[in-house]
Image (cartoon, grey):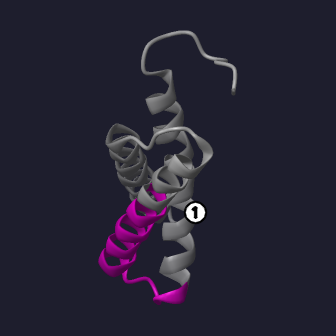
Amino acid sequence: AIPEVVTFPHADKIMHAAEYTVLGALLLRSLLYELSGNFLLAAIITVFAGTAFGAVDEWHQTFTGRFGSGWDVAADVLGLLCGSAFLLVAKNWRKSRGG
């Protein structure tokens, strides 16, 4: 059994969202490079691919005696959206500063 490290309710959802925020920003950044700056297409691929990854990850947990959670996938999607929004804001801010 894996011991509980965090003690407040729904802390695992916050961790899922934080992890997928980083994943979303990094995946979107790499896709922007590969897709020649097409932000909309890169963002759509980021959210769909990241969601699929999160869903498969939850499904894989069922093979280890744990259970998959749709709420964990929802937190993953929230993180992907936050990471994408963060990258968009950072890119626009940098552009407005002349960078």
Badge 1, how many Cα within 10 Å: few under 14, some, many 20+? some
At numbered mark 1, what does the secondary structure look like: helix, strand or loop?
A: helix
x, y percent for residue 30: 57, 75
Which residue is nearer to you in this view: 2 or 39? 2
Residue 44 shows in the view: yes
Residue drawn at point x = 55 percent, y = 82 percent: 33
Residue at image coords 61%, 16% = 6
Q: Name the foreground residue: 26 vs 72.
A: 72
Q: Residue 24's x, y, as percent?
A: 49, 58
Q: Tell me what residue is drawn at x 40 percent, y 77 percent.
A: 42
Dominant secondary structure of the magenta stretch? helix
- Disc 1 marks which residue? 26
Vertical side of 46 occupied by 24: above or below = above
The image quarter in which residue 2 lies: top right
Picture coordinates of residue 75, whole percent (x, y): 38, 41
Q: Amino acid at mark 1?
A: Leu
Comparing 78 with 67, the one in front is 67
Q: Which residues are magenta?
A: 34-54
28 in relation to 65, above or below = below
Instruction: Decide if residue 99 is in sight here.
Output: no
Q: Is residue 64 left or right of residue 44?
A: right
| Residue 88 picture quarter | bottom left
In which quadrant of the rendered image does the C terminus lie? bottom right
- Name the quadrant of the N terminus: top right
Q: Which residue lies most toward the top here? A: 7
The reply to whether the magenta stretch includes residue 45 is yes
Residue 98 among magenta residues: no
Total labels: the figure holds 1
> Percent x, y for residue 7?
57, 10
